[in-house]
Image: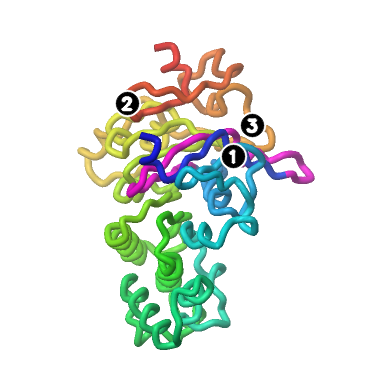
C-alpha cells in the first residue's frame, strides 16, 4: 500500500555549479521510507547521502525530481514550506557545535521551537517542557538548563540537538551522521537515546551514516549510495545475509571484526580497492565499474537500472539484470 510510506523520493537530482564544473551530488535517485521505520542511508564520503537529507529537509532545493511527504509534494525550498511542515520534519546535524547558538543557554535553544510553533504559553510551561526533553536525552535539567554550548562536551551538545529536534513532536527526523564527530565512548550513549526516542514517539527516520555496524543496530531497511546513485535497497537483515551489489560487498568486507566467526560471515572474493570517483566527471555506464572486479564491457557503457530481484530487495547491477 502506497499510504504506508511517509516519504517518497522520485527521480531526485541535486546539482551544484562550481568553477570546475557541475557537481552531480545526487543524480536521479528514488526511494521510499515506511511509517514507523528507520531507513539507513549508507555510503562513502562523496556518495551524496548527506545532500539527499539536506534536500529532503528543505535546506537545498532539488534540481529536478519530486519529494512527497504524507502524499503531499514538498519539492520546494525551506522558505516556501508551511509552518506545519517545518514542525513535522526535523534534522539532527553531524556537527553539534556548529548547529547550536553559542550565546544562548540550553533552555532557550531547546525551547525556541516550542515558542516559534506556539506550543507553550508561559515561562513556567516552557521550562517544564524543556526539562522533560532534556531528561529524555539523559541530561539532568538542573545541571544543563542554564549552561551554554561552550560549557558542555561534544556528546552533550549532540544530546541537546536531539532534544531540540524532538521538541515539536515531529513525525519524521533526519539524523545526519549524528555520532561521527564524537568519541567512541560517547557514541553508544547517543545511539541509545535515539533508539529510546524512536520507540517512545514511534518516529520515522532517515539515518545517514558511513558506519555499517552502527546502521545494523538502528535501521529497518538500508539504502546504499555510490557517487550520487542508489545501488542497492534491502531490509537490514537481508542486506547483511545476502549483499548483492559488488560495492555493497566491498563495504561489508571492509568492516573490522574481532572473531573468526565474524570473519566467516564477510563477503569473499572482493576487497576494497581504489577511491570514489569525481562527481564532476563520473565514470560512464555503471559508476562503480572502475573499482569492480566483475566489470564487463556493458558496465562501462550502459547505466544499470534498479531492479527488484526478490521482494523488497533492489539492486542496480548488470550481473542481476542478465538473470
Q: Position of 184 compared to 86: left or right?
A: left
* Residue 253 figure quarter: top left
Quarter occupied by residue 63: top right
Main secondary structure of the magenta stretch: strand
Closer mark to the observer between disc 3 and disc 2? 2
Placement of the C terminus among the 4 image quadrants: top left
Instruction: Please give left or right for residue 316 compared with residue 285 in the image.
Output: left
Between 87 and 182, the one nearer to me in the picture: 87
Alpha carbon distance from label 1 to label 3 = 12 Å
Q: Position of residue 89 (x, y in %)?
A: 48, 57
| SS state under label 1 | strand
Residue lying at 26% horizontally and 46% vertically, measured from the top left: 258
Q: Report the span colored magenta.
A: 17-43
Residue 228 is left or right of residue 20, and the answer is left
Q: Which residue is mark 2?
A: 311
Mark 1 lies on residue: 26
Mark 3 and 2 residues: CB-CB less than 8 Å, in contact?
no
Looking at the image, residue 231 sits to the left or right of residue 262; the answer is right
Q: Position of residue 94 (x, y in %)?
A: 50, 59
Which disc number belongs to residue 282? Answer: 3
Q: Is 175 located above or below residue 67 in the figure?
A: below
Question: How far apart are the two marked residues, 2 and 1, measured between alpha carbons?
Answer: 26 Å
Residue 154 visible here: no
Q: Is residue 160 something that shows in the picture?
A: yes
Amino acid at each position: 500500500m502506497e499510504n504506508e510510506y511517509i516519504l517518497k523520493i522520485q527521480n531526485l537530482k541535486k546539482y551544484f555549479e562550481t568553477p570546475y564544473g557541475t557537481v552531480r551530488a545526487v543524480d536521479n535517485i528514488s526511494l521510499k521510507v515506511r511509517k514507523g521505520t528507520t531507513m539507513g542511508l549508507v555510503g562513502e564520503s562523496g556518495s551524496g547521502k548527506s545532500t539527499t537529507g539536506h534536500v529532503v529537509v528543505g535546506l537545498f532545493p532539488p534540481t529536478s525530481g519530486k519529494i512527497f511527504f504524507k502524499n503531499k509534494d514538498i519539492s520546494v525550498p525551506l522558505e516556501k514550506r508551511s509552518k506545519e511542515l517545518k514542525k513535522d520534519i526535523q534534522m539532527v546535524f553531524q556537527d553539534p557545535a556548529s548547529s547550536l547558538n553559542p550565546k544562548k543557554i540550553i533552555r532557550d535553544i531547546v525551547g525556541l521551537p516550542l515558542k516559534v510553533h506556539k506550543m507553550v504559553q508561559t515561562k513556567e510551561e516552557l521550562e517544564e517542557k524543556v526539562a522533560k526533553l532534556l531528561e529524555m536525552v539523559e541530561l539532568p535539567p538542573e545541571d544543563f538548563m542554564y549552561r551554554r554550548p561552550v560549557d558542555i562536551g561534544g556528546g552533550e551538545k549532540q544530546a541537546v540537538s536531539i532534544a531540540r529536534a524532538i521538541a515539536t513532536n515531529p513525525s519524521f527526523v533526519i539524523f545526519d551522521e549524528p555520532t561521527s564527530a564524537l568519541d567512541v565512548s560517547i557514541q553508544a550513549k547517543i545511539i541509545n537515546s535515539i533508539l529510546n526516542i524512536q520507540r517512545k514517539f514511534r518516529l520515522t527516520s532517515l539515518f545517514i551514516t558511513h558506519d555499517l555496524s552502527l546502521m545494523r543496530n538502528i535501521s529497518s531497511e538500508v539504502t546504499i549510495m555510490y557517487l550520487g546513485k542508489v545501488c542497492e535497497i534491502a531490509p537490514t537483515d537481508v542486506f547483511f545475509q545476502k549483499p548483492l551489489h559488488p560495492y555493497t560487498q566491498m563495504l561489508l568486507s571492509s568492516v573490522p571484526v574481532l572473531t573468526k566467526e565474524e570473519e566467516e560471515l564477510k563477503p569473499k572474493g572482493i576487497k576494497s580497492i581504489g577511491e570514489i570517483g569525481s562527481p564532476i566527471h563520473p565514470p560512464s555506464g555503471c559508476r562503480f565499474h572502475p573499482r569492480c572486479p566483475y566489470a564487463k564491457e556493458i558496465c562501462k557503457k550502459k547505466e544499470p537500472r534498479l531492479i527488484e530481484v526478490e521482494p523488497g530487495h533492489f539492486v542496480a547491477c548488470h550481473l542481476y539484470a542478465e538473470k
